[in-house]
Image (cartoon, coloured by chain):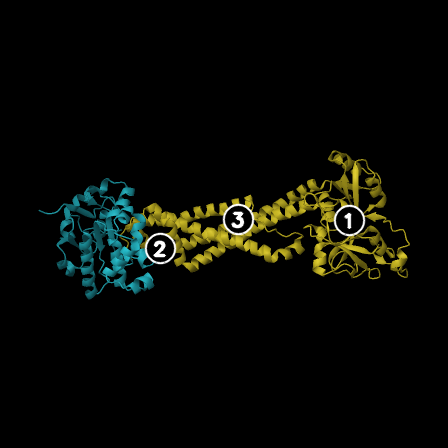
Chain colours: A yellow, B cyan
């Protein structure tokens, strides 16, 4: 008790150095927790995105690549799969449902995904949640579009408004499909997955806007107006990927093998969970490096604290002698310095935590649009508490450096130090 | 018949380094309740004697008894507790802990000594304020000034109040007046003696300045009682 109140008053008396030290530690704690939070949230967001799908099928490519472009809309497909392949996959025994996906166009920086209404029925996120409509409903008409929550919020769309799809991905597309505008038919609830940033239209709609295109450009002299296209057969020739649901997990490996050995064209079927694990293995190196840097930054912060305490110690030798004269034991002098170190670290931890939540609160939206997920408002988890405990333990050890020095002063100076 | 000695030193030998003798005092006895002036020039071993009396260090040979307690035989923890319970110190200067206010500085010994807490007559803060008032510090100075804003003379009075709080049997003053001018020197000493008399404390006053000697019951010349050649140097 005595040591605690003495340490608190001593630190308060050296306000300026104390605040600087606490700030350094707070920032290092913010970095440490921030890196950990991003790491776990990214994993959760990714895992949550593929929760209901048993297999993902695409043209043969890297498993991680297929996973990234099909559901996370990162990168682009190098090859499509034919509609015939899709029909055959859907017909495999054990397959309960299939959702075709066609990617390649965009709307003001947001990916446009062509699919079927079955998507809303079968797609699951965050373990077992279905996508729900905040407004409107699924597409009825050929030129209907359903917007993810983020798209609607960022671009301010309401039901019934028109939007024009641009050809190709990215926000700087030169060519657009201005002759065949879509109408907003539905807006989805926020899911925390890439669906939020997606414009969803029917496969037929994708086919319709490309009806008078060939090889990625409009065919000169062959313009078909929006209504004329309705008369055509709009079954697509090719799609980008297929989400597959099985009637039972038992069929997983058999169906996977059948798809991988499909004679018509080279296909790849992946188990999203397994491929995610592969992805984490790759990411693990980066995460480890980031974590190591954060830990080093914390150590630098604590090093600054040690420097401040040791520097201040010489002018405190008289104070130490006074404390000894009124009966303080040498270990109590040591303890005073250690408690001061712990106080500084504890204050740094508390402020670091507050900063973390301040950052989540203010920058969460920006993170959401750049990274596709935003850290949730949740209490620190076990790992985070352990990290903070580790910082405190490290501060205790660091406090022993000035502490031992003060201990030696208390023995060598006794009561007789003259200044 | 003299009262029982509060300090009883016999054949005491101490050296800071192995082959060096700083203090060699065949005999020194201080009566309980007396006021003793220990005089000696710099380097005569005054500080070493204070450290021995406070139980910070122990003699290499011989005996040093304070309040019938053989300090040389006590373990370090017991000596620290003994010092907390029974001895009040006033130093030459920089007596105060800079981050505590005036009253908290006076109360500092109570944090380390239950015995001195127990001897208090009333609420600790009230007793501290009364002592400070007795020593001539105004309430305004006590309540509004930070310790470093006090004059040196005021700081020394705060230190005296701290040394006296909780009525330790022995008060040791190490050149407490050397940073005061002559007028304040005698006034401070008079107050200190009066407060020691009130609480019944024995006062051991160490100084190189013989001018103050007449105000004491007894004068001990450290150069005469210390047989160590050339006295001692504090390392």
Q: Assess disc 1: are there few (<14), some (14-19) or many (≥20) residues with their C-alpha within 10 Å of its C-alpha.
A: few
In which quarter of the view is residue A85 placed?
top right
* A302 or B138, nearer to the observer: B138
- In this rendering, the answer to whether B44 lies above or below B78 is below
Q: Residue under label 2, please give it.
A: A314
Could you confirm whether marks 2 and 1 are on the same chain? yes
* A313 or B227, nearer to the observer: A313
Q: Chain of mark 2?
A: A
- Real-space CA distance between mark 2 and mark 1, rounded to the nearest whole angstrom: 68 Å
- Real-space CA distance between mark 2 and mark 3, rounded to the nearest whole angstrom: 30 Å
Q: Earlier in the sequence, mark 2 or mark 3?
A: 3
Q: Assess disc 3: are there few (<14), some (14-19) or many (≥20) residues with their C-alpha within 10 Å of its C-alpha.
A: some
* B122 or A319, nearer to the observer: B122
In which quarter of the view is residue A18 placed?
bottom left
Could you confirm whether marks 2 and 3 are on the same chain? yes
Q: Assess disc 2: are there few (<14), some (14-19) or many (≥20) residues with their C-alpha within 10 Å of its C-alpha.
A: some
Q: Earlier in the sequence, mark 1 or mark 3?
A: 1
Can you give x and y, in whole percent of width and height, for residue A152 in the image? 72, 58
In which quarter of the view is residue A311 placed?
bottom left
Q: Residue under label 3, please give it.
A: A295
Side of B194 where A76 appears, left or right: right
**Residue that appears at 61% across and 45% down:** A285
Q: Secondary structure at mark 2?
A: helix
Q: Earlier in the sequence, mark 2 or mark 1?
A: 1
Q: Chain of mark 3?
A: A
Q: Residue under label 1, please give it.
A: A78
Q: Are marks 1 and 3 in contact (CB under 8 Å)?
A: no
């Amino acid at each position: 008790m005595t040591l605690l109140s003495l340490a608190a008053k001593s630190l308060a008396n050296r306000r300026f150095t104390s605040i600087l030290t606490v700030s350094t530690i707070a920032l290092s704690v913010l970095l440490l927790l921030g890196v950990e939070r991003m790491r776990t949230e990214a994993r959760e967001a990714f895992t949550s995105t593929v929760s209901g799908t048993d297999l993902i099928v695409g043209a043969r490519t890297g498993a991680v690549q297929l996973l990234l472009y099909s559901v996370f809309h990162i990168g682009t497909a190098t090859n499509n799969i034919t509609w015939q392949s899709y029909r055959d996959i859907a017909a495999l025994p054990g397959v309960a449902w299939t959702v075709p996906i066609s990617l390649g166009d965009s709307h003001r920086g947001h990916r446009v995904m062509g699919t079927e209404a079955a998507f809303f029925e079968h797609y699951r996120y965050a373990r077992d949640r279905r996508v729900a409509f905040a407004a409107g409903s699924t597409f009825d008409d050929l030129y209907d579009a359903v917007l993810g929550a983020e798209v609607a919020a960022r671009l301010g769309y309401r039901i019934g408004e028109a939007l024009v799809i641009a050809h190709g991905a990215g926000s700087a597309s030169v060519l657009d499909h201005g002759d065949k505008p879509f109408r907003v038919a539905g807006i989805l609830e926020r899911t925390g997955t890439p669906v939020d940033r997606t414009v969803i239209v029917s496969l037929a709609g994708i086919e319709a806007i490309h009806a008078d295109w060939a090889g990625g450009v409009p065919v000169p002299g062959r313009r078909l107006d929006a209504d004329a296209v309705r008369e055509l057969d709009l079954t697509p020739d090719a799609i980008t990927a297929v989400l597959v649901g099985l009637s039972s997990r038992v069929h997983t490996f058999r169906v996977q093998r059948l798809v991988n050995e499909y004679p018509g064209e080279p296909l790849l079927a992946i188990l999203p969970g397994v491929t995610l694990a592969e992805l984490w293995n790759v990411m693990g190196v980066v995460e480890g490096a980031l974590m190591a840097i954060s830990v080093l930054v914390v150590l630098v912060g604590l090093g600054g604290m040690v420097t401040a305490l040791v520097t201040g110690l010489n002018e405190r030798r008289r104070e130490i002698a006074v404390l000894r004269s009124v009966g303080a034991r040498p270990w109590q002098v040591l303890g005073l310095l250690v408690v001061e170190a712990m106080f500084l670290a504890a204050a740094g931890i508390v402020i670091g935590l507050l900063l973390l939540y301040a950052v989540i609160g203010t920058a969460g939206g920006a993170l959401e649009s750049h990274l596709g997920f935003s850290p949730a408002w949740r209490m620190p988890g076990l790992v985070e508490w352990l990290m903070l405990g580790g910082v405190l333990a490290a501060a205790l050890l660091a406090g022993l450096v000035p502490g031992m020095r003060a201990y030696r002063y208390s023995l060598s100076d006794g009561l007789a130090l003259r200044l | 018949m003299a009262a029982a000695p509060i300090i009883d030193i016999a054949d005491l030998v101490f050296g800071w380094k192995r082959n060096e003798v700083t203090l060699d005092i065949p005999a020194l006895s201080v009566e309980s309740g007396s006021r003793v002036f220990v005089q000696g020039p710099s380097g005569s071993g005054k500080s070493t004697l204070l450290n021995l009396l406070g139980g910070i260090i122990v003699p290499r040979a011989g005996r040093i008894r304070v309040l019938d307690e053989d300090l040389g035989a006590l373990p370090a923890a017991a000596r620290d507790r003994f010092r907390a319970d029974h001895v009040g110190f006033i130093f030459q200067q920089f007596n105060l802990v800079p981050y505590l206010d005036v009253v908290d500085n006076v109360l500092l010994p109570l944090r380390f000594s239950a015995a001195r807490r127990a001897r208090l007559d009333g609420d600790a803060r009230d007793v501290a304020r009364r002592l400070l008032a007795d020593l001539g510090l105004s309430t305004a100075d006590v309540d509004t000034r930070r310790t470093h804003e006090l004059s040196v003379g005021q700081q020394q009075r705060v230190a005296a109040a701290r040394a006296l709080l909780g009525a330790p049997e022995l008060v040791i003053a190490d050149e407490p007046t050397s940073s005061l001018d002559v007028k304040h020197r005698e006034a401070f000493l008079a107050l200190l003696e009066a407060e020691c008399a009130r609480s019944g404390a024995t006062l051991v006053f160490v100084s190189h300045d013989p001018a103050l000697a007449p105000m004491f019951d007894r004068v001990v010349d450290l150069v005469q009682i210390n047989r160590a050649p050339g006295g001692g140097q504090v390392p």
